[in-house]
Image: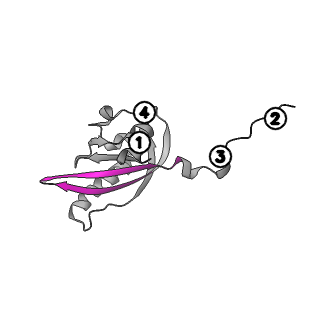
Amino acid sequence: MLDRTGEAIFTVSTAGSMLTSNRAATVVFGWDPLTLQGKKLTELLADSGTGERVLGSFKTLQSAQPKEGDDYSGTGIDSDGRRSPVEISSTQVTSGNTTDYVVVIADLTHHWRQPADLEPEPAPIDV
């Protein structure tokens, strides 16, 4: 199910390292899952301040009820250095004695385009 969504979804450790990712993460950021594994979440964000705010929210989540974080807007950066507007959400997940976080990053590129930009241009007519 997680591989059918268009949002990049990661499991992230309390230290901010990516543990797992879905298929959309590869599409959005251009790195294969094995390369993403172990990278810091902040490496996917062009603005280090946004990444630090997301990681800082993990500490807040540890004591919050319910265990859902804030949404953040920022700029994602893919493997080719291309930047795109993103929205980031996170939530805490606990299994036994292990606490990790699920982080969802939505690429907002299509949301920012004008409707005319999304429609295909008409084909030229040969006369």
State how far apart marks 3 and 2 are (Cα): 21 Å
State how far apart marks 3 and 1 are (Cα): 23 Å
Task: First in sequence, mark 1 or 4: give its number.
Answer: 1
Query: Which is nearer the eye, 123 or 80?
Result: 123
The disc placed on residue 24 is 1
Q: Nearer the viewer, mark 4 or mark 3?
A: 3
Instruction: Count residues near mark 4 (Cα–Cα under 10 Å), then give few for <14, some for 14-19, many for 20+.
Output: some
Q: Residue placed at 74% from the left, 40% from the top?
A: 122
Q: Residue placed at 46% from the left, 31% from the top?
A: 80
The disc placed on residue 79 is 4
**In which quarter of the view is residue 94 placed?**
bottom left
Magenta stretch?
87-109
Q: Nearer the viewer, mark 2 or mark 1?
A: 2
Horizontal side of 65 relative to 31 (left or right) equals left
Task: First in sequence, mark 3 or 2: give its number.
Answer: 3
- Judged from the image, the secondary structure of the residue bearing numbered disc 2 is loop
